[in-house]
Amino acid sequence: MKNKKIVLSKLFLIVIIFFSIFCCFYNKTFGNENIFDKIDGSIYFEIIGAGVFSSFNIDLIFYNSFLIRYGIVYNKYNKGFLFGLGGLINFKENNFIEFGSGYVKILEGFGENTWHIFILCGYRYQPDNLGISFRLNISPLIKYLKYEFMTLEEQLYYKKDTIKLILWIGVSVGLSF
């Protein structure tokens, strides 16, 4: 049952990734004027950040102000997925203040079957066309710890399921399109 959930989660993410790339490149390929004209995107790798240690993410940015973020948490410590919503405030050409929040579910590894919510506020450089994007943010995590998955030391300290607040940061580098 556990493996089936993981396979379905990975399949779902792959479908979303291909749909996102299609949406962002549709106008550039066919030259049609439609809603896809107002969608930009970014594919990036985040160090630390919402995925705790690292994550690979895709953002869809609508009308330079609203974004949908999803990604895969895949490193030697844990595997999972993340989803987030946010907004952008443009304060100078290609420079944005980014804010938002999201959800991360860890499926395998350290913290298996736990989840956390992230809150995000920071700086984003996002070129209009194909180019290098950069993000730097403060990203506090609200983490849910299940008692049965805690270390012995944590079980002695917490005595039951608990919620923990962790002050965190994130740095991302990627490709905008």
Image (cartoon, grey):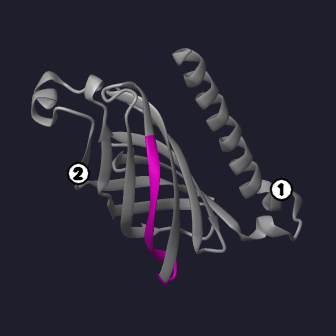
As displayed, is residue 87 above or below residue 41?
below
Q: Is residue 86 left or right of residue 40?
A: left
Q: Is residue 91 left or right of residue 166?
A: right
**Which x, y percent locates residue 43?**
55, 50
Amino acid marked by disc 2: Ile
**Which x, y percent locates residue 115?**
39, 39
> Is residue 5 magenta-colored?
no
Q: CA distance from mark 2 to mark 1?
A: 44 Å
As displayed, is residue 116 above or below residue 153?
below
Our reading of the magenta stretch's main secondary structure is strand
Give the image quarter of residue 31: bottom right
Q: 56 or 112: which is nearer to us?
A: 112
Q: Secondary structure at mark 2?
A: strand
Amino acid marked by disc 1: Thr
Name the image quarter holding the C terminus: bottom right
Residue shown at 38% from the left, 70% from the top: 123
Magenta stretch bounds: 91-104
> Is residue 101 magenta-colored?
yes
Name the image quarter holding the N terminus: top right
| Residue situated furthest front in the rendering | 160
Query: Pointer 1: what residue?
Result: 29
Residue shown at 32% from the left, 27% from the top: 77
Residue shown at 46% from the left, 54% from the top: 102
**Which x, y percent locates residue 36?**
78, 64
As displayed, is residue 100 above or below residue 12?
below
As displayed, is residue 108 above or below residue 80?
above
Residue shown at 42% from the left, 61% from the top: 134
Q: Secondary structure at mark 1?
A: helix
Query: Pointer 2: what residue?
Result: 166
Q: Residues within 10 Å of mark 1 (few under 14, many from 20)?
A: few
